[in-house]
Amino acid sequence: MRTSLLTLGLLPACGGPITNLRFEEDADFLAALPTAERQTIHYAPGDTRRIPVALPAGSPDLRSWTARIAADVNAAVLDVLDLVDLVRSHPPTGRTDDGRTWGPWEVEHETWLVVDIVRSGLGQYDWTFSLSEAPGGPWVVGLGGTHWAGTTVAEGDGDFDAHIGTIAGFLGGAAAGEVAVDYDNREGIDLIVVFERFRGEAGGDLLDATYAYREDPLGNGDFQFATDADVAEGAALEHVAARSRWTAGGALRADARLDCGDLGEFAVTLTQCWDETGALVHQGDDAGLFEPVGSTEDCAFPEPSLPDDGEEG
């Protein structure tokens, strides 16, 4: 005698109902890991929709510097996140009530990877990416951090440290140093990236620098950075500490302090503003070194604002 699906639905069942809870919890553990969307600087002044107007001869270009340095910071963070992304397309190899493990897997250059995430009270997730030359270890932590869940797991805050030299040693790269990231994704993006004796490629200079970035929920950005550049067109590089603020539409104001290098004991404060098309609408400095352009009234942000500490972003 055939049994209908309706009849089957009325039969008593052994055990509990089938649910997606295991997979939903897997997703929560993965959401505690950093992503490119939440841990990078969102600024692209090279957008082809904008038509930049040439700067007066001899003027620094704070807009291009903002783009270049943001891209350099993002590149270093994205290199780290490439390792993180390896786990996203795979199910865990081990599960407990408050933990997940991925691996060990052989990734490349005869290097094995294992990922552990442990959840504790109050939405805290501690995670590590460990590397080894053999599937049984010994294991060395190349990347690790702590994430605290917000309204959702992803909308939280946390920090992580990437031991760049350790990772490069296993994977055959020439990079060196440490990168530390502190972030808060509860309202937009709040990001601090610290480089300690960092080198991205063979022969590059070792870098110590701190960069700060904020993005509100509307997409307005605030980026503080420092760099060395040949502003005075002389034998030595000048130090530039700048704060760039931009609207979601792309209008930007950059305020910078220029000193050292060929400027010696002399310091200059420079402001440049662009509209949403990329046109320079204002340029001015407190020493009369650069050709003035327009008025601060044309700036998207009317008030000047240098980096918080005046030395590094």
Image (spheres, rainbow, N blue to C red):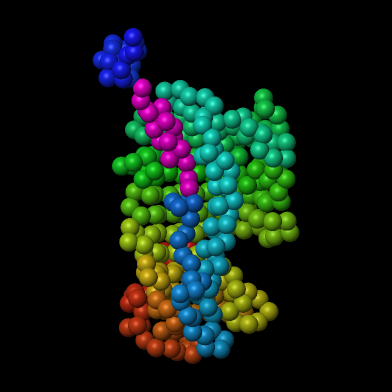
Residue drawn at 27 percent across, 19 percent down: 6
Relative placement, left or right, of 150 versus 255 is left
Going 49% across and 32% down the picture, which residue do you hit?
A: 117
In this picture, residue 61 sits left or right of residue 279: right
* Residue placed most toward the observer, 288 or 159: 159
> Which one is nearer the viewer's eye here, 129 or 31?
31
Q: Quadrant of the N terminus?
A: top left
Foreground pick, 75 / 1:
1
The relative height of residue 304 versus residue 147 in the rendered view (above or below) is below
Residue 172, horizontal then vertical, whole percent? 72, 45
Overall secondary structure of the magenta section: helix
Taking the image as drawn, is residue 187 in sight? yes
Q: Quadrant of residue 121?
A: top left
Q: Position of residue 13 (x, y in %)?
A: 31, 12
Does the magenta-highlighted stretch encompass residue 257?
no
Pick out the residue farthest to the front: 1
The percent position of residue 130, horizontal first and vertical second, equals 60, 34
The residue under the point 69% across, 40% down is: 108
Instruction: Provide the residue span drawn in magenta.
Output: 18-35
What residue lies at 39% left-to-right and 64% top-to-bottom?
Answer: 221
Determine if residue 309 is in view. no
- In screen coordinates, is 157 left or right of 102? left
Residue 99 spot, x, y in % from top left: 46, 27
